[in-house]
Amino acid sequence: MSETWKPSEVEEIPENTIESGKGRKLLHELEMTGQYVFHGSPVLNIDELEVRQPYNWEEGDPKEHGVPSVVATPYADIAIFRSLVYNDYTGFGSDDEGRLHFDASQEALDSAKSNVGNVYVLARNNFSPMHGDENEMDWRAQKSQKPVQIVRVTFDDLPSGIRPMES
């Protein structure tokens, strides 16, 4: 089941319940406005996203990825994927034409079936693209950020066509 609520309501059971698979539709509508970026997490009830050191995991080892910041993306599907698919091996990117692709091991996908994710919707004007390109996936804020909305997502909200990866 996907749910959405305002941060002031996160301590209570959300009243505004959406059918399973509908969180992605809502997030895409927000994405189309161009006013938001998204941060996906399995952690619920984050009132404020704090500045932290981001890492890339290459060959099982964490490597610092830029300066400490709040990391978000203008692409809702990336945030949905990151909030649900995080066990074992996963990855995502885009091709030369900007089409997103997602990769996950079967173990990660099997685990995601029972996961509930949270996509934190954040004001885009507080962020800037890491390398200056408005179309890039990685946007950063140097100060803590309060979400304007939180959308719960489930396996049914994942983008289609996730490619298999070896564990």
Image (cartoon, rainbow, N blue to C red):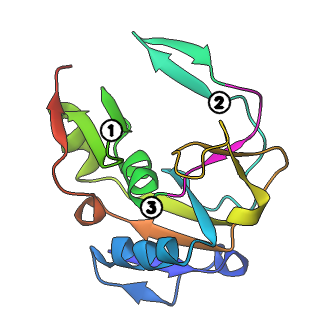
Residue at 85 percent of width and 48 percent of height: 143
Q: Residue furthest right?
A: 143
Assess whether residue 144 is covered by the magenta stretch.
no
> In the shown orientation, is residue 39 left or right of residue 103?
right
Residue 54's disc is 2
> In the shown orientation, is residue 78 left or right of residue 66?
left
Magenta region: 66-74
Question: Which residue does the numbered mark 3 point to in the structure image?
Answer: 76
Q: Work out whether mark 3 precedes mark 1 in sequence or the reverse, and give the earlier one.
A: 3
Q: Nearer the viewer, mark 3 or mark 1?
A: 1
Q: Secondary structure at mark 2?
A: loop
Q: Nearer the viewer, residue 69 or 105?
A: 69
Q: Work out whether mark 2 precedes mark 3 in sequence or the reverse, and give the earlier one.
A: 2
The reply to whether callout 3 and callout 1 are in contact (CB within 8 Å) is no
Residue 96's disc is 1
Label 1: few (<14), some (14–19) or many (≥20) C-alpha neighbours in 10 Å: few
Mark count: 3
> In the shown orientation, is residue 44 left or right of residue 80?
right
Residue at 28 percent of width and 42 percent of height: 102
